[in-house]
Image (spheres, grey):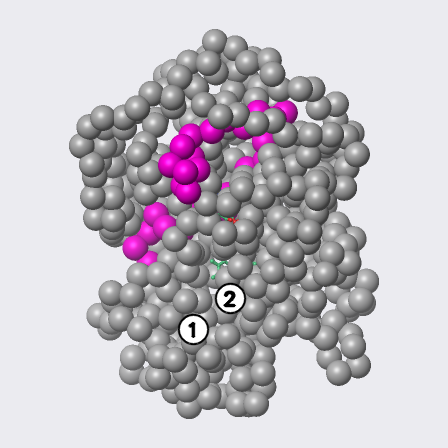
């Protein structure tokens, strides 16, 4: 098998991966350069579709302060956010976001040239920066991708996916196996710093705001490699995705910022309903709004409710939300006149690979940043626009940490790694699978049984079915193509979500169980570690 060697290898090219590659490339202790590997073209990611914005507690906004941001984050996190981590990330935002601006990212400004800050649900003040109105993710990924392509110390490998993390008997990461979609070949990359920035798991669900690549690959690979995986039961369902028909699965997001600017939710009888569910109404935390909408939909036997944005001044509405108004117009909806059909959709993964703010995981040499990581910032429910902030702060801290590390050459591979490489050098025989159909079945199963409201009965049913699906999919690590690898990873992720959801015998934040009450007390993370005898344990 072909192999190469780099000082650092970043998997994924969303906000976290792109910014990490740039910051790593500035370090002088990486003589063999940085490689960034990505499944599609550079920048294709969840990040690219981010609308609302990025939290910035900036010196340019004297009305804001770290204490207030930390308070809002902890409150949304339902007792499970880590206070120290939250404070660190909030405090770092000024330095890191101003560095992002120096890297070429343009945030929207008023006529006087001052940055403009918007409001989103559960934030007590206006502190969200945005770009291109409602095209923040595009603004960030395009600027960072441009800088990455220009950087001579960074090699870009597109249309290639990481399919295995190589870990030796001492639990040290030595690199990864890559499947190159263009050549159809597997390759090995050796490195002492493997950075997982592969994003979330939205594609596990029938309805999602996430693009097709969000199949949880990095988390599945890290789990198989023996890293601790944390809080996978906490899947955030965004309350308002465009619901044109029950068949439309991959759903365009209608940003929370539209509610931040005054839009109201109405049910199919034209009644505003949020005051029945929260005194914060449309600006209650995301999990609360999602459950309220779900309840209205179920009560009225409808597959959506509506968001009425026509109460916002039309000029402001179109200027502030060009992407949203444009997409709705393409679908025959003038949002200044007609309410927008919306319904919840899987949006964000609070859990992931347990990691510190500088990306360190439970495996030496393996780092995780961005949505694939679980640092404890988001707790049981992420506060809007905190995700992009976490991506860039952790990428920045990772590069700082690595700048002080002594990166040895990763050649020290042992028998276990050689055996693993051997698995990938053998050819595969056997039947072919109808993966699109299998993926759809899995998505339907997860939506119906491991979705917004969960029960023991539904979770057990899903668990049994996933076991059956695993047994029917006879691929032993190596697969034939990208689709098969994604399905393999999705099955692993489904098991992790279900296992954690079954163990959490309470409702907390986004994990809502019909058989247990909502609580904010006795916070504990759920951790899963693959061992010979698989176990699930809780730590504080
Ligand atoms: P991603 O941006 O998802 O990037 C992951 C990358 O990894 C991709 O390039 C993918 O192709 C690649 N990849 C995956 N698997 C593999 C593999 N096996 N091998 C190689 N490459 C792989 N958050 C906010 O803070 N503010 C917002 O306004 C906001 N709006 C959002 C709107 C939408 C529609 C969505 C979906 C999310 C939004 N979020 C928002 C959440 C936020 O965008 C994401 O959490 C964040 O961008 C994740 O960044 P990331 O770099 O960790 O992962
Ligand atoms: C949105 O714009 O509503 C999404 C913001 C986020 O996910 O943080």
Between 352 and 86, the residue placed more toward the observer is 352
Q: Residue furthest top?
A: 415
Q: Give the range drawn in magenta.
A: 179-207
In the displayed structure, 95 sits above or below 423; it is below
Residue at image location 31% in from the left, 73% down from the top? 244
Q: Is residue 85 left or right of residue 168?
A: right
Spatial CA distance of label 2 from label 1 is 9 Å
Q: Which secondary structure, mark 1?
A: helix
Q: In this view, does 539 lie to the left or right of 71?
A: left
Is residue 54 in view from this perspective? yes
Q: Position of residue 151 (x, y in %)?
A: 70, 47
Residue at image location 23% in from the left, 32% down from the top? 473
Q: Which mark is residue 274?
A: 1
Residue that numbered label 2 is attached to: 284
In the displayed structure, 68 sits above or below 34; it is below
Q: Is residue 194 left or right of residue 423?
A: right
Residue at image location 72% in from the left, 75% down from the top? 109
Q: Position of residue 219 (x, y in %)?
A: 46, 36
Instruction: Identify the image quadrant of residue 52.
Output: bottom right
Question: Do the residues under discs 2 and 1 have CB atoms within 8 angstroms?
Answer: yes
Whether ligand 2 has any atom under 8 Å from the Cβ at mark 1 is answered as no
């Amino acid at each position: 098998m072909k192999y190469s060697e780099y000082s650092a290898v970043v998997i994924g090219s969303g906000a976290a991966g792109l910014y990490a590659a740039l910051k790593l490339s500035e370090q002088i202790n990486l003589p063999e350069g940085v490689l960034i590997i990505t499944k599609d073209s550079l920048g294709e990611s969840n990040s690219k579709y981010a609308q609302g914005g990025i939290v910035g507690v900036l010196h340019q906004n004297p009305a804001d302060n770290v204490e207030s941001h930390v308070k809002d984050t902890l409150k949304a996190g339902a007792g499970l956010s880590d206070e120290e981590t939250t404070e660190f990330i909030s405090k770092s935002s000024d330095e890191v976001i101003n560095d992002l601006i120096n890297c070429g990212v343009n945030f929207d400004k008023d006529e006087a040239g001052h940055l403009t800050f918007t409001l989103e649900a559960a934030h007590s003040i206006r502190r969200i920066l945005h770009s291109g109105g409602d095209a923040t993710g595009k603004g960030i990924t395009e600027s960072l991708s441009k800088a990455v392509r220009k950087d001579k110390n960074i090699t870009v490998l597109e249309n290639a996916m990481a399919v295995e993390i190589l870990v030796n008997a001492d639990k040290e990461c030595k690199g990864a196996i890559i499947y190159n979609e263009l050549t159809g070949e597997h390759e090995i990359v050796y490195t002492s710093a493997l950075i997982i920035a592969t994003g979330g798991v939205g594609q596990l669900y029938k309805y999602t705001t996430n693009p097709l690549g969000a199949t949880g690959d990095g988390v599945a690979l890290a789990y198989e490699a023996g890293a601790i995986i944390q809080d996978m039961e906490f899947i955030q369902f965004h309350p308002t995705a465009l619901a044109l028909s029950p068949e439309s699965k991959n759903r365009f997001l209608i940003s929370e910022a539209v509610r931040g600017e005054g839009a109201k939710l109405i049910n199919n009888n034209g009644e505003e309903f949020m005051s029945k569910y929260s005194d914060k109404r449309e600006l209650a935390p995301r999990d609360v709004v999602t459950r309220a909408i779900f309840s209205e939909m179920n009560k009225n036997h409808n597959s959506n409710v509506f968001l009425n944005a026509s109460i916002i001044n039309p000029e402001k509405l179109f200027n502030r939300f060009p992407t949203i108004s444009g997409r709705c117009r393409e679908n025959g909806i003038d949002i200044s006149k007609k309410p927008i059909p919306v319904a919840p959709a899987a949006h964000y993964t609070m859990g992931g690979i347990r990691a510190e703010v500088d990306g360190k995981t439970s495996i030496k040499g393996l780092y995780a940043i961005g949505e694939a990581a679980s640092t404890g910032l988001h707790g049981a429910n992420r506060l809007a626009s905190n995700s992009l902030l976490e991506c860039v702060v952790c990428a920045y801290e990772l590069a700082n940490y690595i700048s002080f590390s002594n990166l040895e050459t990763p050649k020290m591979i042992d028998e276990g790694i050689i055996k693993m490489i051997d698995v990938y050098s053998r050819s595969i025989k056997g039947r072919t699978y109808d993966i699109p159909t299998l993926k759809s079945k899995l998505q339907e199963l997860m939506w119906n049984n491991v979705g917004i409201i969960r029960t023991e009965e539904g979770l057990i049913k899903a668990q049994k079915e996933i076991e059956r699906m695993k047994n029917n999919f006879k691929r032993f690590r190596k697969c034939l193509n990208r689709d098969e690898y994604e399905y393999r990873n999705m099955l692993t992720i489904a098991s992790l979500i279900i296992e954690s959801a079954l163990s959490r015998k309470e409702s907390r934040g986004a994990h809502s169980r019909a058989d247990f009450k909502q609580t904010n007390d006795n916070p504990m993370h759920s951790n899963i570690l693959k061992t010979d005898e698989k176990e699930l344990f809780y730590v504080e």
